[in-house]
Image (spheres, coloured by chain):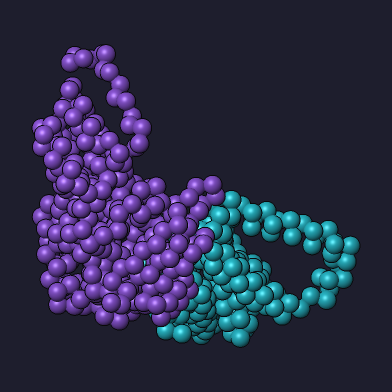
Amino acid sequence: MSYAIDILNVTRAFGSRTALDDITLRVAEHSICGLLGRNGAGKTTIMSILAGQDRPTSGRVEVFGRRPFENDAVLAKVSFIRDNQRYPDRYCLEHVLRIAPVFAANWSEDLAEELVDGFRIPAKTPIKRFSRGQLSSVAILLGLASRAPLTLFDEPYLGLDVTARAFFHDALLRDYSAHPRTFVLSTHLIEESEALFDQVVILDAGRIRVNASIDDSHECAFTARGNSDAVDHIARGYPVLQTHAIGALKSVVIEGAPDDEVLAQAHQLGVSVGTPSLQELVAAYGADTSPVTPRAISKGTRA
Amino acid sequence: MNAVISTTRLHLNRRRETFVVPLSIAGMVAVVSILISLIFWRSGSLPGTPGWVSGSRSNPGIAYALVGFLIYLGVSSVATTFPFALALGATRRAFVGGTFLWNAIAAAYIAALFAILNGLEILTHHWFAGFYIFDIYILGGGDTAKLLLIVFLGVLSCLTLGGVFAAAWERFGVRGPQAIAVALVLALAITAIIVVPDLPAIVAAFQLWWLAVAAAALSLLAALGTWLLLRSAIIR
């Protein structure tokens, strides 16, 4: 198998803050990788480094077998439009449509036209006055129509309405099927995007917590729900990622796979054991180990 | 080389700013200069007299009016275009090379534009009424070769200087341009302290090519500084 992305022991520090902490990651060519995690987990930093917009403090990064930073040949194959992308002053859609093919060798006029129509991107309004959703549409337009061998989508759904999101999914899958290439997509809309992913990477605080195929990702953890004492008994000896308790009932997400003994005990104690959804898994890995204690509401009409 | 040309085309994509705005600014200044000349005319000064010609040719309005816009254009060519160029796949090296090439193209365009307008002005005996807009001392006093050199190097200096300030902002945030400004003021002050005793002799020996060399050196230094600053700038 050949890899579009090969990251080995990469750390990125900004002063005293470590954005990426010794991460190692490979993404196969012609696949879609979901980069998931909380805000500040390090998703955009990874994409910046892959697109040659930043350099790791230590470690090695290769895109299509070569280091991306200041590498013309590699960067010509990468498309990365940030969620907060800055555009030149007084830029309108026509400027974007005129310049993008100059940089993107595989630019598709037909796909660009379809995306402009599908997202209803305004032609005359300056991009600086675009709504959040319209900015996301321009980023998707640039990312998809460029047909770059590696396309990095950073929160492509921000501000998009439900129709636009469905249109994006449809356009992405259709074009990916016709022109296979590698996508890395970061998002918080996990349930909507899950069907797109071949590989899932869950980051938290600059570390990779899960790196698995979409099928295997569900085996990374299990849920246990039931009487508080019984759930604690089941969870004993396992790393608990997240806990919810309401009265005598408790629900936990536990890292690892339950063995037969645990399943038998759970059955005996009336504890329901299941597989967490990808969204539950991401939430669990992002949860604080010492959960924030909710403050009692003492004032207000419904206190 | 392709990425350099692509970056130049990225800048040229702002056709209005590169080609139309300098022309419209020149047009506006021409109208204002003519209005001022008309005021002088009505107040008793006569077109074609030595005083009228000398006064009109000493008016540097056309040069001053463009400086502000050109520095803004230089700043915006880096501040907002750099992140977009990198998003499209340009390297920092290609961006600086392509930007410098665009600076030179814009400078050549404005110099050619001014030369044509200067030629028209002379051909029409100063717009049929003795109005001096381009045939002025600061632009070479009607000498086309001097005008081309002065405008080309002047525009190139403004654009590259604006670019290096924006690059400092990309690299160090607000403190970057402040540091460059302080360094420039200090350099000018120290130079003045050193040369003031010999100033009369320097003024007496002054040659126009000194300014040309200084402008060319300033532009090259600014482009080099832009590259050094952008080389390690992080896109946010």
Chain rendered purple: A
Task: Locate residue A235 relative to residue B88 in the image: left or right.
Answer: left
**At 18% across and 22% down in the image, what residue appears?**
A247
**At 36% across and 54% down in the image, what residue appears?**
A208
Q: Position of residue A159 (x, y in %)?
A: 22, 50
Q: Is residue B224 visible?
A: yes
Chain rendered cyan: B
Q: Is residue B110 visible?
A: no
Relative to A280, does residue B150 appear above or below in the rendering?
Answer: below
Instruction: Tell me where residue A79 sits by quadrant.
Output: bottom left
Q: Position of residue B211 (x, y in %)?
A: 70, 75
Of A149 and A35, nearer the camera is A35
Task: Locate residue A268 relative to residue A197 in the image: left or right.
Answer: left
Of A303 and A86, nearer the camera is A303
Task: Locate residue B89 relative to residue A237 in the image: left or right.
Answer: right
- Quadrant showing the C terminus of chain B: bottom left
Q: Position of residue B53 (x, y in %)?
A: 63, 72
